[in-house]
Image (tube, helix red, strand yellow):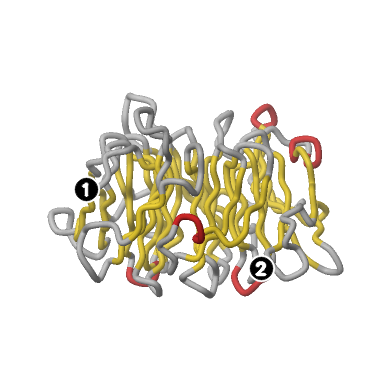
Amino acid sequence: MYPLTCVDAYKIPTREEVYMLDLLPLTSGPATISSDQKLSFFNPTSLRTGPLSNYVTHHGNLTCARAFDAGTSTVCTAGEDGSVSMWDLRLDARRAEVARLTDNQVPVLSLACSSAGFSIVAGTELHEQYHQASILIWDVRSTPTPKFHYKEVHSDDVTELNFHPTDPNILLSGSTDGLVNICDTRIADEDEVVIQTFNHDASIHHAAFINETEVFALSHDEKLALYDMAEGHENGAATMDFGDMRNVLGCQYIANISVKANGAGAVIGAGALDQQAFQMIHLTKGESWTMDQANSVGLPGAHSGEIVRSFCFYDEAQMVFSGGEDGFIKAWRTNA
């Protein structure tokens, strides 16, 4: 394992317990969302001086965020009241919320954004009264009413959404119903929109494309498997089943799996609270998919005894950022 050194850090200054919920790797620096309902934007070379800008969100309870366009620092947030907001982080706090979508009143658990497809997608909780979980798709060029509203793609909370890496019409969705569905968002008909289904048989925590045809699915009980939507795999069975990652990696939780650009595999972020440890393991494809544990990268001390919620890389700067339930955002790099 190659240990990195914590070279910079910032803690949310509050007496109350505040978590860093997620990190967004924008081109100009990391943005965070936190449990005090704030969206913050940081200078990547100077975390300790605090956020360059702070924005108070108005979702009742902030649950998720995604970059709409990382290059222009445009971000979407959503939350408990069902609303979705778009923010331009280049603007001051009074003008930064450039759009607000309020057609939905069911709590939002997941978001996906595609600037190429002019789309924002939200996944909701299972509505108690109507017994349905929804996927709503907005076209940002048109009215603030959803273009499509799918109510039958999943039978429980929609916990994950991600677009295909090259086709902005293809959407992946994951749910606590155990399914990962691949949808063609050009199709309005609920009976036709799902073009492939993978049954992970466990509540989906994270899922995404790792290349043009292959998908990973990670359950809330840390089971990881890979699936393929290419021809010849129509039965939807896992092409690689790693099982419980806590046993495979000797960890206690998986924070997330970050997909590398250009089909260069993915990085698994694994934590062990009792060791105050967090390591990143490269998932790479040769003849088959393997985990390169011998060359893992470690964050010694991590976020003390608290869970690491999110991590991201800036490869050119050779830096890693992490956010945790201790309220810290930290920057890490090699000793060199």
Q: Nearer the viewer, residue 102 or 294?
A: 102
Q: x, y (%) of residue 93? A: 17, 54
Residue at 28 percent across and 50 percent down: it is: 84
Q: Answer few, some or many: residues within 10 Å of disc 1's Cα (few below 14, many 20 plus, some between 14 and 19).
A: some
Can you give x and y, in whole percent of width and height, for residue 311 in the image? Answer: 54, 50
| Image height of 267 relative to 156, above or below | below
Q: Which residue is drawn at the image coordinates 56% and 48% (left, top)? A: 6
Along the viewing direction, whichever of 319 and 234 lies nearer the viewer: 234
Q: Which residue is mark 1?
A: 102
Q: Is residue 45 visible?
A: no
What element does badge 1 sit on?
loop
**Residue type highlighted by circle 1:** Thr
* Circles 2, 1 touching at the beta carbon (< 8 Å): no
- Residue name at image x 56 percent, y 56 percent: 320
Residue 8 — which label?
Answer: none
Q: Where on the picture, by quarter, is residue 305?
A: top right
Kind of residue sitting beneath label 2: Thr
Residue 280, horizontal then vertical, whole percent: 68, 51
Residue 133 at x, y = what percent? 43, 40
Residue that sits furthest to the top in the current view: 16
- Decide if residue 37 is in sight here: yes
Count of numbered circles in the view: 2
